[in-house]
Image (spheres, rainbow, N blue to C red):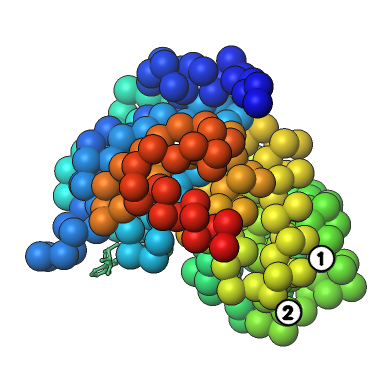
């Protein structure tokens, strides 16, 4: 099989130069419990990088440290959109990190209540993000919210209903709409379709794939499911017990996994 490597993916594999996100030696301990250890990777602009591993392997820990939901124990994370990548975002002041979450990176969580205020309408959730980003004109905010909800297939006649009245699939669509509202250069997706019914999950996955392509946002996609990683990413890391045990092109990794743990994961995915 011929594997095409885009210039962007090649650049990410070659090193940090020009990467949207460069994570180096990221380690997190929860007291005596290891969250992740010495995790390093680059994401090129416009690239979607996958992180796969079974439950407890440290995937969410990596995401949460990069997103600023949790403090890392050590390591660094540089984003090219921040200061050309000179500043380590892991050590920024908390107020600066909160600002980063509005302007430079957005997160889509498995649990919509982490990314959305369920008591507030879909339109209100998006308006909150736009307002935080400095939008002031009510008409423009409303127009942008409607545009995003339309694009993510959320019925506009539900736009003013509280998100808690929505189905699981619709909540994830609203999370995506909100995450992309302000066109961030980096998107982190942590198990975005886990817990949804298979047919609903498939629709949300299609949407994510299309949005990644349309917006050109750099993304990190975390999942325990190879189907998700295969569909959304060209390159991925395999995590096991907090560490990266293998890294490669997703197609090749699925076809010819090298590490015994990756072989086990791929075997399980094939059923
Ligand atoms: N808030 C926390 N407090 C203590 N231990 C945690 C916490 N979050 C995660 N862990 C532990 O860190 C390890 C990695 O968890 P996590 O990053 O959630 O893995 P994954 O997302 O791959 O399922 C697991 O052993 C988990 O029990
Ligand atoms: Mg997780």
Task: Give the residue at mark 1.
Answer: 154
Q: In the structure shown, which secondary structural element does the residue marked by tag 1 occupy? A: loop
| Residue situated in front as seen by the camera: 232 or 134 | 232
Position in image of residue 54 (x %, y %)? 40, 61
| Residue situated in front as seen by the camera: 116 or 238 | 238
Position in image of residue 240 (x %, y %)? 31, 53
| Residue situated in front as seen by the camera: 256 or 64 | 256
Q: Is residue 57 above or below residue 135?
A: below
Observer able to see residue 33: yes
Position in image of residue 46 (x %, y %)? 60, 29
Observer able to see residue 235: no
User: Marks 2/1: CA distance?
Assistant: 10 Å
Give me the residue at 72% from left, 84% from top: 165
Q: Is residue 85 above or below residue 52?
A: above
Left or right of 188, for residue 126: right
Task: Give the residue at mark 2.
Answer: 166
Left or right of 157, for residue 129: left
Give me the residue at 39% from left, 65% from top: 55
Residue furthest to the bottom in view is 165
Position in image of residue 231 (x %, y %)? 66, 46
Image quarter where ligand 1 lies: bottom left
Q: Are marks 2 and 1 in contact (CB under 8 Å)?
A: yes
Give me the residue at 62% from left, 64% from top: 193
Q: Say few, some or many: other residues with alpha carbon within 10 Å of mark 2 (under 14 / 14 to 19 / 20 or more).
A: some
């Amino acid at each position: 099989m011929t594997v095409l490597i885009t210039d962007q993916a090649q650049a990410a594999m070659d090193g940090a130069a020009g990467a949207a996100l460069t994570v180096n030696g990221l380690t997190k301990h929860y007291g005596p419990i290891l969250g992740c250890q010495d995790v390093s990777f680059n994401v090129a602009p416009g690239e979607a990088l996958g992180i796969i591993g079974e439950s407890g392997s440290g995937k969410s820990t990596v995401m949460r440290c990069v997103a600023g939901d949790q403090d890392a124990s050590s390591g660094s994370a540089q984003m090219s959109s921040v200061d050309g990548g000179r500043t380590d975002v892991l050590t920024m002041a908390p107020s600066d990190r909160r600002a980063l979450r509005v302007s430079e990176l957005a997160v889509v969580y498995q649990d919509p209540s982490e990314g959305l205020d369920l008591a507030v309408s879909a339109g209100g959730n998006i308006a909150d993000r736009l307002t935080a980003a400095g939008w002031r004109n009510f008409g423009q905010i409303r127009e942008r919210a409607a545009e995003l909800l339309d694009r993510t297939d959320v019925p506009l006649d539900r736009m003013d209903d509280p998100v808690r009245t929505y189905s699981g699939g619709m909540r994830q669509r609203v999370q995506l709409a909100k995450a992309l509202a302000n066109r961030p250069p980096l998107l982190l997706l942590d198990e975005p379709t886990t817990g949804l019914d298979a047919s609903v999950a498939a629709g949300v996955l299609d949407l994510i794939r299309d949005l990644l392509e349309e917006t050109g946002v750099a993304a990190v996609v975390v999942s325990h499911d190879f189907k998700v990683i295969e569909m959304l990413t060209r390159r991925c890391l395999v995590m096991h017990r907090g560490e990266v045990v293998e890294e490669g092109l997703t197609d090749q990794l699925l076809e010819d996994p090298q590490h015994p743990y990756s072989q086990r994961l791929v075997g399980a995915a094939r059923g």
